[in-house]
Image: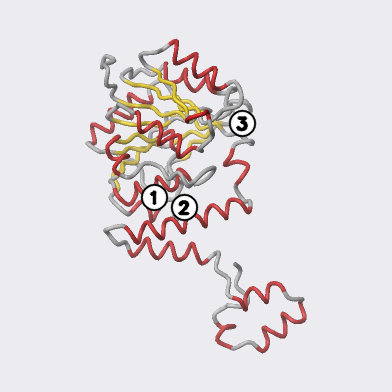
Amino acid sequence: MLMHTSQPDVSIIMCIYNVEKYLREAIDSVLHQTFTDWELLLIDDGSADGSTQIARQYAAAHSTKIRFSEHQEHVNKGLSASRNLGLSIARGELVAFLDADDVWLPDYLEIQISLLRQKNVSVICEATAYWYNWNAPEKENQVVYIGAAQDKLYHPPQLMLELYPLGKGAAPCMCGIILERDLLRKLGGFEDSFRGMYEDQVFLSKLYLNAPVYISSNHHNLYRQRSDSLVGSAQNTAAYHVIRKQYLRWLKVYLRQHPQKYKEVDRLLQQAWGTYEVSPLRLLVRLVPGRLKHILKKYAPASLVRQGKLTAKV
């Protein structure tokens, strides 16, 4: 086992925002890792509960392993900006992420880092156990495998085609990803303009388009399922689609600036945009009363009817 040095092998970025109920358990899961050559960066994103005090206490008690940081004047800047702050002070060759309400099993780092080096890759993503029984003992946890063939290396842009948000397969969770720090910095880190949702998907899109990624069937991380979480409360709402459209706009610009062109990705992006595009005539048909709608359909150009322009779902 590697001894702790002034330059740790892996920097763990944990962003904190009003998670006093879960924070100790998350930090303790890092302290209990069998792999010990790490530093934990606690990044406070303007917490208003007891999270700040808890984080400072851990940093003081484990000053050689845990560092506390926050934005100037203790302001809330969002998850992307907080991760970027952690990245700016990270000293490890590798970077890992653990949200402050999730946990790692004790051998998470040892297994992930060993496999990363064995496969000689810069990025490794493992499956995730969706953690239900933390407060519902009668409910079984569910292992969610990344939605592509397991235990395999993928080159750009294959995962972009297979995984959410453009593909159908399940995306990796941040608590199951380890990558080289220099690669993350080369990619530009996280996009500060995304606050609240889609931070992970923007980062993952950059990763899929620029670096080989190894997908592992291991699952040594627990993703706590909370009804009050940001993702749990925002999906299937109008706000979700606003952010998704923001992501699609961002991706369009990013692809335009990307030196390599991927026609398959462009096609999927166009399909994703198609769910939000409504022609004026289709919009009118959706809004007008039933009798007038029938007349419009009856006398509209046959070409529109044949193409399903008036009847297709948006």
Give residue 139's mark: 3
Q: CA distance from mark 2 to mark 1?
A: 9 Å
Label located before the other in sequence (3 or 1):
3
Res 287 → quadrant? bottom right
Most distant residue in the front direction: 73
Q: CA distance from mark 3 to mark 1?
A: 33 Å
In the depicted structure, whether residue 126 falls above or below residue 234: above
Label located before the other in sequence (2 or 1):
2
Viewer-nearest of discs 3 and 2: 2
Q: Are marks 2 and 1 in contact (CB under 8 Å)?
A: yes
Which residue is denoted by mark 2 in the rendering?
165
Q: Residues within 10 Å of mark 2 (few under 14, many from 20)?
A: many
Query: Hey, what amino acid is under mark 2?
Result: Pro
In the depicted structure, whether residue 175 falls above or below residue 167: above
Query: Hey, what amino acid is under mark 1?
Result: Ser
Query: For the point 56% across and 22% down, which residue is it?
Result: 51
Query: Hey, what amino acid is under mark 3?
Result: Lys
Label located before the other in sequence (3 or 2):
3
Query: For the point 27% across and 58% down, which residue is it?
Result: 259
Front residue of this view, candidates 311 and 259: 259
Image-based side of 24 in relation to 174, left or right: right
